[in-house]
Image (spheres, grey):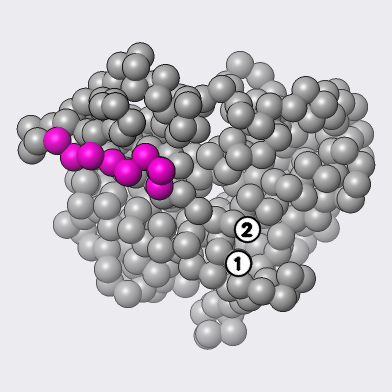
């Protein structure tokens, strides 16, 4: 698996012969092209046409984040696995409302089951989350393939609201009280980490889509429209509880992240550079960690698991095998 490079400082990305380097006030830092799959840019970084051409030829995806740590866009090189046939199949499953609803329901079901697995894990360790489990089971019993996608998403939103209400019981840390979900901008430390982690998750999934025949612009749960990429949002729903939330629980429960890792602004609380680096370090560690995959009978990294999920989706779209989302067994 190729690496992800994160850039926090201001500077310029350049091409030199058959390699690239980042130039800042601290000097030049050369980057090993053969090991890079994506570059996540957190600071003010300039590039040139020559550099972007080089990224295209080496299939390197660039992801940009803004001041509030939100993902704002990508340089997505020309698809090297482009498949007209797959695009047609994706469009067919989007335009056929029954097929689209089937996939949308599956993404929501996968997300809900992984949320429940997280809660059951903590229930077995003495955390008071039974009430949330019962409420989520009740909400999920209302889901069915006949309802409109907007109705499905409303129930999914309610599930996540109930799930987030369990965070205080899981963490038992007054310094990281959840209170309520706030987004643009986040109003407390937990919300800041959730927003930042979700942005990382979306870009990770987008980079993995780049290495398949799928087109990220055609999603099913999230409407395909002028927003650009939507399929990565769909697939990320399955993995956010397993990757983003588990990273947050680790950082807080092990006292790795503290108040000093956040900056309080007039209208928000955001991770500072040190906090972002800490979060990314734990997130990357989680992506590269492996577990025994029951069906395959071998160890698989979580990053590889995302790619495998996309391959399963491809098989569904071409009629080889019905798609079933990955569900964790802790």
- Whole-percent x, y for residue 148 in the image: 83, 34
Quarter assignment of residue 46: top left
Tell me: residue 302, above or below residue 297. above
Is residue 84 visible in the rendered image? The answer is yes
Number of residues whose C-alpha sits closer than 10 Å to that of mark 1, classed few (under 14), some (14–19) or many (20 or more): some
**Mark on residue 128?**
none
* Whether residue 219 is situated above or below residue 166 in the rendered picture: above
Magenta stretch encompasses residue 258: no
Q: Is 116 in front, or is 231?
A: 231
Q: Is residue 30 magenta?
A: yes
Magenta stretch: give its range: 28-35
| Numbered label tally | 2
Judged left or right of residue 219, residue 251 is left
In this rendered view, identify the residue nearer to me: 176 or 245: 245
Residue reaching furthest front?
17
In the figure, is residue 259 to the left or right of 136? left
Q: Nearer the viewer, residue 226 or 2?
A: 2
Distance in Å between CA atoms under marks 2 and 1: 7 Å
What residue is pinned by disc 2? Answer: 305
* Element marked by disc 2: helix
> Residue placed at 65% from the left, 45% from the top?
235
Q: How dense is the environment of label 2, judged by Cα within 10 Å: few (below 14), some, or many (20 and up)?
A: some
Where is residue 312? Give x, y as percent.
77, 50
Residue at (78%, 35%) from the top-left corner? Answer: 149
Marks 2 & 1, CB-CB < 8 Å contact: yes
Q: Is residue 136 positioned above or below 183 on the image?
A: below
- Residue indicated by mark 1: 300
Query: Looking at the image, is 78 positioned above or below residue 179?
Result: above
Q: Position of residue 252 (x, y in %)?
A: 34, 67
Mark positioned earlier in the residue sequence (2 or 1): 1
């Amino acid at each position: 698996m190729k690496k992800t490079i994160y850039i926090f400082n201001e500077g310029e990305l350049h091409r030199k012969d058959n390699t690239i380097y980042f130039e800042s006030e601290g000097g030049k830092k050369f980057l090993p092209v053969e090991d890079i799959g994506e570059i996540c840019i957190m600071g003010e970084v300039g590039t040139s046409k020559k550099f972007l051409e080089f990224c295209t030829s080496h299939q390197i995806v660039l992801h940009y984040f803004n001041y509030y740590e939100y993902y704002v866009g990508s340089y997505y090189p020309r698809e090297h696995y482009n498949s007209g046939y797959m695009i047609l199949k994706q469009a067919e499953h989007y335009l056929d409302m029954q097929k689209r609803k089937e996939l949308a329901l599956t993404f929501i079901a996968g997300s809900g089951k992984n949320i429940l697995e997280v809660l059951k894990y903590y229930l077995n360790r003495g955390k008071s989350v039974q009430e949330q489990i019962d409420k989520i089971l009740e909400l999920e019993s209302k889901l069915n393939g006949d309802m409109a996608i907007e109705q499905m998403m409303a129930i999914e939103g309610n599930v996540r609201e109930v799930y987030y209400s369990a965070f205080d019981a899981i963490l038992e840390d007054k310094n990281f009280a959840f209170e309520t979900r706030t987004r643009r901008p986040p109003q407390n430390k937990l919300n800041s980490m959730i927003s930042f982690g979700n942005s990382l998750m979306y870009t990770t999934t987008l980079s993995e889509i780049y290495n398949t025949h799928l087109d990220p612009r055609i999603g099913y749960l999230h409407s395909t429209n002028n927003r650009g990429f939507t399929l990565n949002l769909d697939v990320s729903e399955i993995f956010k509880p397993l990757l983003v939330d588990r990273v947050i629980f680790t950082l807080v429960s092990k006292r790795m992240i503290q108040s000093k890792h956040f900056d309080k602004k007039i209208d928000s609380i955001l991770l500072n550079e040190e906090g972002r680096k800490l979060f990314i370090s734990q997130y990357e560690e989680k992506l590269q960690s492996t577990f025994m995959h029951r069906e395959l009978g071998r160890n698989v990294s979580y990053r590889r698991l995302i790619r495998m999920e996309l391959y399963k989706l491809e098989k569904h779209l071409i009629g080889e095998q019905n798609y079933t989302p990955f569900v964790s067994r802790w």
